[in-house]
Amino acid sequence: MRDPNTAATPPPDAAHHSQKGAPSDTTDDRSDEERKRDAELAERLSRLIEDANSRVVPLCKMIRKHIENMEAKKEEDRNESELVEQVRPLLQQAEKILNETQGMIKGADPDNRLSDRAKRHAQTHRATPEEQRLAEALKVLLEEVGGTIEWARDKLDSFPKAKRDLGPLLDALGQPLTQIVGGVGMLLAGVLNLLGNLLSGLGLDSLLKGIVAATGLDKIYSGLGLGKWLNSK
């Protein structure tokens, strides 16, 4: 008979459970091979987007410069046709670069095998250096291209003729940008959480939220429990 003054010894399973504690939401249940493939994919996508940034960011700066120069002129000296001729080829070139990049990102996962697996593992691991690099590259792309599109739309309100000609080109430039971010989100879902945090510090997270909603990722992310920042103010 057990002495009532002696504390009961917990069974081995209970002791093990108390040491283990609640399961961590950052437990990585991927195999070594899956981790390696995810890292390689993130690196490949980073290189694609960094290359696009190196070519498209200078174009965005030139677009801004042309509009600023025209804005600085006296109203009677402004030539909107000249502004259109300056900015149109830059927008078209930027759109071409982003369309090429979007095609290469789509080609990174032709059978959707990676995206299906990425969705399963989206919430199961801490961000890797490769994913952080990819999020940073996307931040630059959204900040420069998405930011320039929004900025130019606002500035062109003062130039109705130029806006009529350039507005559709700004819309066209936004389409591959949306597809690039959405495509990465389908391949490596956790990267958009990182990206959302980076952009919120710049006041640009509304751009990303719009893209996520436009591509239907908001529904997928909510189902994965990743939609917290989507609903943040």
Image (cartoon, rainbow, N blue to C red):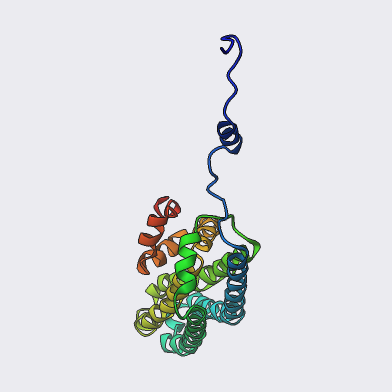
Q: Is residue 230 visible?
A: yes
Query: In this picture, is 108 found above or below 26?
Result: below
Q: Residue furthest front?
A: 1
Q: Residue at x 57, y 33 (%)?
A: 18
Q: Is residue 186 visible?
A: no
Q: Nearer the viewer, residue 77 or 148?
A: 148
Q: Nearer the viewer, residue 230 or 32?
A: 32
Position of 223 with respect to 188 (left or right) is left
Query: In this picture, is 192 found above or below 21?
Result: below
Q: Where is residue 219 drawn, in percent x and y?
A: 35, 60
Q: Nearer the viewer, residue 153 or 188?
A: 188
Q: Where is residue 85 drawn, in percent x and y?
A: 46, 90
Q: Nearer the viewer, residue 131 or 159?
A: 131
Q: Where is residue 101 drawn, in percent x and y?
A: 52, 82
Q: Residue 138's quadrant in the figure? A: bottom right
Q: Residue furthest right?
A: 129
Q: Where is residue 71 drawn, in percent x and y?
A: 48, 75
Q: How many marks?
A: 0
Q: Residue at x 57, y 65 (%)?
A: 135
Query: In this picture, is 6 found above or below 69?
Result: above
Q: Quadrant of the N terminus?
A: top right
Q: Residue at x 59, y 62 (%)?
A: 31
